Image (tube, helix red, strand yellow):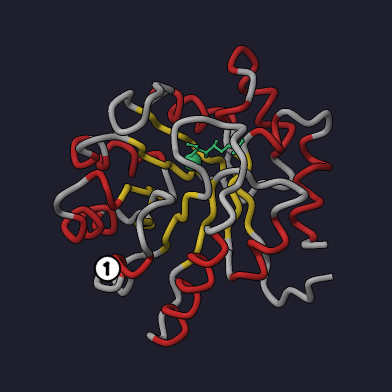
Amino acid sequence: MLGLTKNVKLSPSILSADFAKLGEEIKKVENVADYIHLDVMDGHFVPNITYGLIIGESLKRVTEIPVDSHLMVERPEIFVDDFCKISEIVSIHYEATYHLNRLVNRIKENETKAFVAINPHTPVEFLQDIIMDVDGILVMSVNPGFGGQSFIPNTLNKIRKLDEMRKSMGLSFEIEVDGGINEDTFKPVLKAGADILVTGSYAFRSENPEAALSVLKKGS
Ligand code: DX5
Ligand code: ZN
């Protein structure tokens, strides 16, 4: 047992779902999901193309679970207003925009939670002058672009440092961790300070997604 004092939030990513049956796939996780994670990829910021607003709008028609949009795109400023309309959380990458503060403020003006995502090579210290303005930080624990990759162990140090920064600055932003989360990796991630876990392949490629997610939800 981890003796967790907080509730873990789960954000299953439809990246590993069967798109021919998206509505049915969502039903499989609905009882345990706090968010549905929407991985938007443009083929420029990452070497893969997924889906955009149209799929997000479809999700809204089949579930009331809030959408957590992760924009892995260049020039996210073009897209944020539209994604705010369908999302409770919008994550933009630190590496993808010149004007992070401006964009974070714009997301918040749209009454949406503003999260900043960082790639595995980006130090958490680079967030020193933005963390007081965000609702959350999304720490990538794989190189973004694909589901089913292995968790990068150094991510744990990054989560710990971010949690220390949060405490020492008296802040309450959430820490979301994305990539390679499964029943073998989630415990140290939570112990390091994560609040929200994204799970793609672990959730949607298991025989019983609800049972698989319940293991993470219990934290034991
Ligand atoms: C990767 C995406 C992740 C992905 C995680 O670029 O941001 O959200 O779906 O998939 P797993 O859990 O399989 O690593
Ligand atoms: Zn993601």
Q: Secondary structure at mark 1?
A: loop
Q: Quadrant of ligand 1?
A: top right
Relative to 17, is 76 above or below?
below
Can you give x and y, in whole percent of width and height, for residue 162 in the image?
45, 71
Q: Is residue 32 left or right of residue 109?
A: right
Q: Quadrant of residue 77?
A: top left
Q: Amino acid at mark 1?
A: Ile
- In this rendered view, identify the residue nearer to me: 157 or 127: 157
Q: Residue furthest top?
A: 20
Q: Is residue 164 left or right of residue 128?
A: right
Q: Position of residue 213 (x, y in %)?
A: 75, 46
Q: Position of residue 90 (x, y in %)?
A: 38, 48
Which residue sits at x=38%, y=65%? 124
**Residue 141 location, x and y as percent?**
52, 49
**Quadrant of image for the C terminus:** bottom right
* 123 is higher (above) or lower (below) than 35: below
Q: Which residue position is annotated with label 1?
A: 130
Q: Is residue 31 left or right of residue 44?
A: right
User: What residue is shown at x 16% (from left), y 57% (from top)?
Assistant: 102
Disc 1 C-beta below 8 A from ligand 2: no
Q: Residue at x 41, y 80 (%)?
A: 171
Classed neighbour count for the residue bearing mark 1: other residues with Cα under 10 Å, few (<14), some (14–19), many (≥20): some
Q: Is residue 103 left or right of residue 111?
A: left
